[in-house]
Image: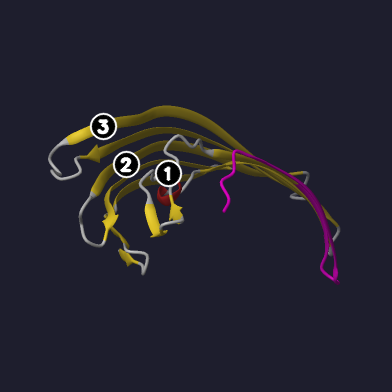
């Protein structure tokens, strides 16, 4: 990306993305219930660099940001019917462990091989994410459903990239590498009638969300 304005400033940005993803799923039907299990591993890396300065190149500021996010996860889901299949239940549990590695390097004004300042933002966190779905059939036309779950929202790479991309001398975009992931908790109760009546009541809670 190359940005230049009549104000005499320029910004040149270069970002690359690499994604590796491996998943293993297993389904085991038993007489009274069905079990699903799985493992997953994701590796995302994104090196980027930005160069800022006046159009005459009298002073050139360059910075690099190397970001890597690895996530290992395992899940288990059980599903079964009760009371002559009037009640269906599905419960799940997912465990995630995430490793974050970020390094910002501010390079020399005239020599890009001269590292003036280097800053690292590394951390590891674990999350346990349960889900529960219940469906009660009230005759042939109506049913009552209850759903509960905890989810996770991670900031995207642009939200965490600390390099400054200038649109003009007064406006620039910059992320925060110290951002934490967000979590959502939801509870939903719904009534459905196939003849046309649908009613839903829900509760939704969000923590540490990133919004523009």
| Camera-side residue of 201 and 89 | 201
Q: Earlier in the sequence, mark 3 or mark 2?
A: 2
> Residue 68, how many percent across, how many down?
32, 40
Q: Residue at x 60, y 36 (%)?
A: 130
Check whether the beta carbons of the residues at disc 1 and disc 2 lie within 8 A of each other: yes
| Few, some or many residues within 10 Å of mark 1 (<14, 14–19, 20+) | some
- Residue labelled with disc 2: 67
Q: Which mark is residue 117?
A: 3
Q: Earlier in the sequence, mark 1 or mark 3?
A: 3
Q: For the view shown, which residue lies furthest in the bottom direction?
A: 195
- Residue labelled with disc 1: 160
Q: Residue at x 26, y 37 (%)?
A: 105
Please tell me whether mark 1 or mark 3 is closer to you in this view: 3
Magenta span dominant secondary structure: strand
Q: Quadrant of the C terminus?
A: bottom right
| Few, some or many residues within 10 Å of mark 3 (<14, 14–19, 20+) | few
The alpha-carbon separation of the residues under discs 1 and 3 comes to 18 Å
Residue numbers of the magenta segment = 188-212
Examine the image and state in which quarter residue 5 appears. Answer: bottom left
> Residue 60, how many percent across, how many down?
22, 50
In the rendered structure, the answer to whether residue 110 lies left or right of residue 9 reads left
Does the magenta-highlighted stretch encompass residue 195?
yes
The alpha-carbon separation of the residues under discs 3 and 2 comes to 17 Å
In the rendered structure, the answer to whether residue 1 lies left or right of residue 93 reads left
Check whether the beta carbons of the residues at disc 3 and disc 2 lie within 8 A of each other: no
């Amino acid at each position: 990306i190359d940005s230049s304005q009549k104000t005499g400033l320029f910004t040149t940005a270069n970002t690359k993305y690499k994604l590796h993803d491996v998943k293993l799923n297993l389904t085991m039907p038993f007489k009274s219930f069905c079990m699903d299990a799985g493992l997953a591993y994701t590796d995302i890396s994104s090196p980027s660099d930005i160069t800022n300065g006046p159009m005459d190149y009298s002073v050139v500021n360059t910075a690099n940001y190397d970001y890597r996010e690895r996530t290992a996860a395992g899940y288990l889901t059980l599903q079964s019917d009760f009371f002559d299949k009037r009640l269906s239940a599905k419960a799940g549990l997912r465990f995630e462990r995430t490793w974050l590695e970020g390094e910002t390097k501010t390079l020399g004004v005239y020599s890009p091989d001269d590292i003036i300042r280097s800053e690292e933002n590394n951390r590891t966190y674990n999350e346990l994410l349960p889900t529960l779905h219940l469906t009660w059939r009230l005759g042939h036309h109506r049913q009552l459903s209850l759903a509960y779950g905890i989810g996770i929202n991670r900031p995207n790479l642009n939200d965490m990239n600390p390099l400054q991309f200038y649109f003009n001398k007064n406006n620039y975009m910059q992320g925060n590498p110290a951002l934490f992931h967000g979590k959502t908790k939801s509870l939903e109760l719904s009534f459905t009638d196939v003849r046309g009546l649908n009613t839903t009541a829900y509760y939704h809670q969000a923590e540490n969300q990133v919004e523009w």
